[in-house]
Image (cartoon, rainbow, N blue to C red):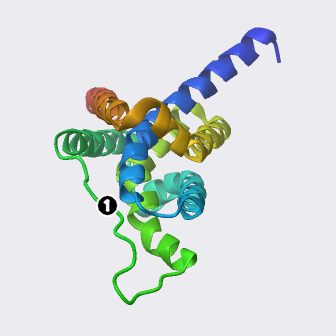
Amino acid sequence: MTFPEIQADLHIIFTAVLAIIAILNPFGNLPQYLAMTEGMPTPTRQKLFRVIGYTAFIIVMIFTLTGPYIMKYLFKIEIRDLRIAGGLILIIMGVKNLLFPLKVKYQGPEAGEDETEDEIIRKSIIPMAFPMMVGPGTLATMIVISADNGMIATLTAASAAFLFILALFHFSASIERVFGKLVLHVIARIMQVFIVAIGVKMIMNGMKDAIAYLTS
């Protein structure tokens, strides 16, 4: 493999990593996670964030490997259809999160209730891992990325993206102290705009493919 070919492959993977990070939206989810776990013991919060990352990674990997076959052979859906549907989901979810952000706060166990760390994590993993981090839009986008870039490049990019997210979550407390909740809130809103833009691009590409198919 020549150096230009290696450069091209690295560029494809890097672009896919950025797209996956944008769709998973860790910068937008982090302020929500911090708010939802406010009052939770620090060790429990850190363990919960790790479990969220691992759970989301497993969901993405399984669906990326099986999704194309389910889509093609079970539901008879073409990639152009998925581009349009996935784009619509991203736009709707992005606008919803931009205008009506989720406001949930961890309240701790009720009076007389003594929850263990595992119980707290089990109750909190939903909706934090699914559908907050990995939702229908994410799963649809992963299939589109694999169709455009190939399965190996997509799985490599997903692994790199989740390594970044796990590092981000690991230092979440320090990030909150350094930047403050206001800056994180602003970043969260900005990321929603990028998600909407990705949705628009997916719809445009899907419609372009559909028009080409109908006119061929």
- Image label count: 1
Relative to 133, say whether 47 is above or below: below
Whole-percent x, y for residue 33 in the image: 41, 52
Name which quarter of the figure residue 54 lies in: bottom right
In the rendered image, which residue does mark 1 sit on? 105
Residue 207 left/right relative to 100: right
Whole-percent x, y for residue 44 in the image: 56, 64
Whole-percent x, y for residue 200 in the image: 27, 30
Q: Residue at x 60, y 46 (%)?
A: 170
Whole-percent x, y for residue 183 in the image: 36, 30
Q: Residue at x 49, y 31 (%)?
A: 178
Residue 142 vs residue 161, the one in the foreground = 161
Q: Residue at x 30, y 41 (%)?
A: 90
Name which quarter of the figure residue 161 lies in: top right
Instruction: Identify the residue at the far bottom of this view.
Output: 112
Residue 155 left/right relative to 198: right
Residue 166 vs residue 211, the one in the foreground = 166
Q: Which quadrant is home to the C terminus?
A: top left
Q: Which quadrant is home to the N terminus?
A: top right
Q: Amino acid at mark 1?
A: Lys
Instruction: Identify the residue at the far left of this view.
Output: 99
Instruction: Identify the residue at the far right of this view.
Output: 1
Q: Is residue 216 visible?
A: no
Residue 138 left/right relative to 196: right
Residue 75 vs residue 97, the one in the foreground = 97
Instruction: Identify the residue at the far top of this view.
Output: 4
Residue 208 vs residue 62, the one in the foreground = 62
Q: Secondary structure at mark 1?
A: loop
* Few, some or many residues within 10 Å of mark 1 (<14, 14–19, 20+): some
Q: Is residue 133 visible?
A: yes
Q: Residue at x 48, y 82 (%)?
A: 115
